[in-house]
Amino acid sequence: MNVSYAWLRDYVETDLGYVEAAKVLTRIGLNVETIEDLPDDLPPAPAQTALGRRPGGTGQGDGVLDVEVTSNRPDCLCHLGVARELAAALGTRIHLPPADVAECDEATADAVAVEVQDGALCPLYTARLVRGVTVGPSPDWLARRLEAVGLRPVNNIVDVTNYILMECSQPLHAFDFAGLEGARIIVRRARGGEAFYAIDHTRHELGPEHLVIADAHRPVALAGVMGGAETEIADTTTDVLVEAAVFDPLNIRTTARALGMASDSSFRFERGVDAGLTDWASRRACHLMVEVAGGRVTRGVVAVGKPPTERRELVLRVPRIATVLGIEVPADAAADILRRLELEVIEADGRTIRVRVPSHRPDLEREIDLIEEVARHWGYDRIPQSPTVRVTIATPTRAERVRGVVGHVLTAAGYFEAVTFSFTTPAHAVRFRPREVTAEPLTCRGTALALRQAVVSGVVESLLVNQNAGERDVRLFEVAKRFVPVDGQELPHEEKRLALAGPDDFHAVRGVLESLAARLGLARRLTFRPTDRYPDLEAGAAAEIALDGEAVGMIGRASGPAAEAFGLDEPPTVAELSYDRLVEAARLEPTVEPLPHFPAVTRDLAVVVDETVAWADLLAAIEGAGAADLESAEPVDVYRGKQVPAGKKSVALRLRLRSPRGTLTSEQADAAQGQILSALERDFGAVLRG
């Protein structure tokens, strides 16, 4: 960001020269990379826009400072923003230039109509009208100031819009009002194949993802990026419509990159502009246009949308400053720094400072951001060097401990962790969700992307990447969020999920999940039941995962159409379950049981039951049979064939019997086995297979 120091001094009182000012800016985190000397005869701005002093001190005359501005500080992409920082460092305040407008009797609303068809992409649009201007070269002070920061003067009207851009970072556009058909401004999405002729005389074909400023018949500007040739300011222009607006940053960035039309305006819109300053910038532009080009400003403004009125409130815990920085900063000094940065200090005592953040500081979102502001202006050089580093060992949280177990078990089972994007194509976003979920996924404004409703869709996309690279035997897992729309709510329901995908069969993946459940102390609480709730899973090869009887996920082999939709040659087996419920239910403390004193008796049985009977139901009946010496029951095999009637299956199981009182006799074991067989016959009509 090129900053003219003479221009900067229009807003902040200081006797420093530009060399000393560069040192101050660098000290507070706005690194000045280079300094370019300018001639001493640079014309000053008009008296009503300046403080009336030329730079003094070391580095006489004017200098251009190349200030490094990080991406989170869009407020410093202008002279006013840098002036705020310099004033805060020097303990003074900035002086805003005048933006008063002497309006004529004609109402702006009677001369022009504004319609915004997509409020999400354009939350605020304002229009003012200046009639009777005389377009010509800019006065020397205006032209030379633009040249000083690297901009080429065009004419007095266009130069004013560029001056405002460099003054307060609000992009403006000036239309030749006579070229606007129907005296209308319509902010809308472009129609497919619609042509746009830019002021650089290039032709572009637009699509619905592009936002345009149109008149009654055609696009006259690409919103936030570049104006159109049909309405550019010319020597014959007499009436000027001044646009000042706020556009969606992501849409502007996508449009500028896709069409190769990056501009100074799009650069600032991409990073976010201060909606609270938009109307001031419009009035300031009209003020300067009348000053340099004559004319009169019509009464009022036509505005669609409003700037946000709510301001973020943050709390700074004063002791936290010492914890983070390693030095004590007095509470009153910290509060003073925040006031000098134009934060409203609502209350302050020796331990907490509560502030309200101004609209031009979108980067201040958390307490740590306030600590950074205090550190910058208290002075990084006041933080002492130490030969030792203090290390504080924090006890792992429950979630961190569960995360460690998940990673250990799954990597031991041959899985690699994947990190995928929450956004995917609208078609993939609805894959692997339950049948009853029919809501359309939330889309990303201005793009062809949608939030996924199942995490496993992203993991399956990663399988395709590996398949295309020749790696087919890949097992992947991910812990991430899914986003499911909720009727009547603007925001979706967010839930962290564990997703797996790979080439193994159903039983192998189920075994991995059972091993994980055992490590988390959930071995008997995680169960699997056949389901048809998931249309993207193969019929007969899908199960619902339940935790303590509550459905928490699914497991199954992807159907052929689902695999084809992702471009996979073979359907993978996938699983997804609620990670939040795993964290909540996990029993992480180890338990110890004494070793048995007496040997166990093992009995293998095979019972014939209906095909629909699940092992979980058999196990519940076995455990509820009342056999006091039952230690465990495990499935061994399932047989279907000639020796088993149609609609039936033979389930082989192993009973382990043990008594704490002594070695079981065969009669005692027979009695326990009989109790269990009676319960199975009673509940399921089970027959002991010979």
Image: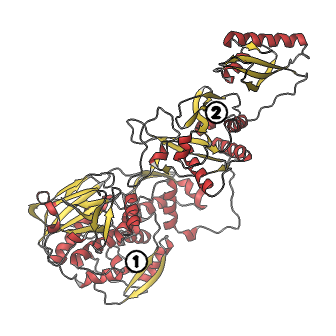
Residue 293 at x, y percent in the picture: 16, 77
Q: Tags 1 and 2 in contact by the CB under 8 Å rule?
A: no
> Which secondary structure, mark 1?
strand
Vertical placement of residue 233 versus 273, above or below: below
The disc label shown at residue 585, or none: 2
Residue 273 located left or right of residue 566 = left
Vertical placement of residue 18 versus 223, above or below: below
Closer to us: 90 or 39: 39
**What residue occupies the far left of the structure in this picture?**
105
The disc label shown at residue 364, or none: none
- How packed mark 2 is, by other alpha carbons closer than 10 Å (few <14, some 14-19, many 20 or more), is some
Indicate which label's residue lies in the foreground, 1 or 2.
Answer: 2
At 86% from the left edge and 18% from the top edge, which residue is drawn? 660
Residue 88 at x, y percent in the picture: 42, 68
Give, as a three-letter code, the residue at label 1. Asn
Residue 659 at x, y percent in the picture: 86, 17
At 72% from the left edge and 17% from the top edge, which residue is drawn? 608
Residue 235 at x, y percent in the picture: 17, 79
- How packed mark 1 is, by other alpha carbons closer than 10 Å (few <14, some 14-19, many 20 or more), is many
The quarter in which the C terminus is drawn is top right
Disc 1: which residue: 2
Give, as a three-letter code, the residue at label 2. Ala
Q: Specify the color scheme.
A: secondary structure
Q: What is the C-alpha distance between the residues marked 1 and 2?
A: 57 Å
Residue 246 visible to an observer of this rendering:
no
Closer to us: 219 or 315: 219
Residue 582 located left or right of residue 214 = right
At 40% from the left edge and 71% from the top edge, which residue is drawn? 82
> Which secondary structure, mark 2?
helix
